Image (spheres, helix red, strand yellow):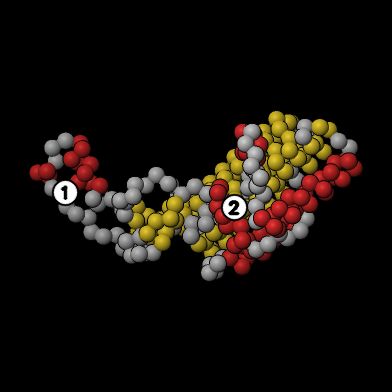
Amino acid sequence: MAFEAYPELNKAWKTTCRMIFKDEVGELEEFEDYLKEAVIGKEVTSVSGKPLWVLSEQYCNSAKFIEFGKDKMPSAKPLNVNSIKDIDSLLGEISENLQYSGNKILGNSKMVEHSDAIVDGTYILNSSGIQRGKCEAYVYMMHDGEYAFGSTSSGESSHIIRCFYTNSMKRCFECSASVALSDCYYCYNIMNSSDCMFSFHLRAKQNMIGNVQLSKDKYQELKEKLVAELCKDMKRKKRVGFSIIDIFNGEINE
């Protein structure tokens, strides 16, 4: 990837993988297709011909875009008052002057590329809706996080991969609708827990696999085997063939 932020992000990715998978699984760029599944938004072209990233997918195909802070906004065409007969005709006249902006990088942001609506972000790539983030790639709507990859709507979390609608997470992979977890894999609707795998709807638990309580030693033994399998898939396939969303919906396709 020809991005200035990439080398630092690649280091952060490898650090995160060592924490989660107990080994490096490859270069960040090799996982682009897998990780970008979490990002909402789309790429558009500015009036100056530069590719931009915008936060929403809902812009119409005829919308015009400028790069925030760089492109000069074209002069607005004066409204033809005589052509205004009703609201529809008024909106038609106004729409010809609308210019949307992409690549909005605000506040004390540095090394932010191909991203939109970033405030106080450092080393951010292919992401949108970030506030006070550091080393994040393919992330959508996250605040006060760092070392996050392929995640949606999370806050105050670090070293996470493919976590969705979560908060206060550490060293987690494929967790959703959960709060205050550490060292968890494939968990849904879990709160205030640590060291859980493939578990659902739990509160204040530890050393659980498939909602079964295990001793610490037994948990660690099984966890080592399961994480080794996940790591093998990540290295070979550059993805794991199922997500926490697939499991919860009963749709697992390897």
Q: Residues within 10 Å of mark 1 (few under 14, many from 20)?
A: few
Q: Residues within 10 Å of mark 2 (few under 14, many from 20)?
A: some
Please, is residue 72 above or below residue 221 in the view? Answer: below
Contact, CB < 8 Å: mark 1 with mark 2? no
Task: Kindly indicate the quadrant of the structure image that contains residue 153.
Answer: top right
Q: Quadrant of the C terminus?
A: top right
Amino acid type at mark 2 = Tyr
Spatial CA distance of label 1 from label 2 is 47 Å
Secondary structure under tag 2 reads: helix
In the image, 131 versus 115, the foreground residue is: 115
Query: Which of the labelled discs sits on residue 3, or is there none?
Result: none
Q: Which residue reaches farthest front?
A: 254
Q: Residue at x 13, y 37 (%)?
A: 85
Where in the figure is residue 182, as x and y percent of width and height?
A: 74, 44
Query: Which of the labelled discs sits on residue 79, or is there none?
Result: 1
Where in the figure is residue 103, as x and y percent of width and height?
A: 44, 58
Mark in front: 1 vs 2: 2
Where in the figure is residue 48, as x and y percent of width and height?
A: 33, 65
Q: Residue at x 26, y 60 (%)?
A: 74
Q: Quadrant of the N terminus?
A: bottom right
Q: Is residue 199 visible?
A: yes
Query: Which of the labelled discs sits on residue 34, or is there none?
Result: 2
Please, is residue 151 above or below residue 87 in the view? Answer: below
Q: Residue at x 13, y 48 (%)?
A: 80
In primary-sequence order, the first of circles 1 and 2 is 2
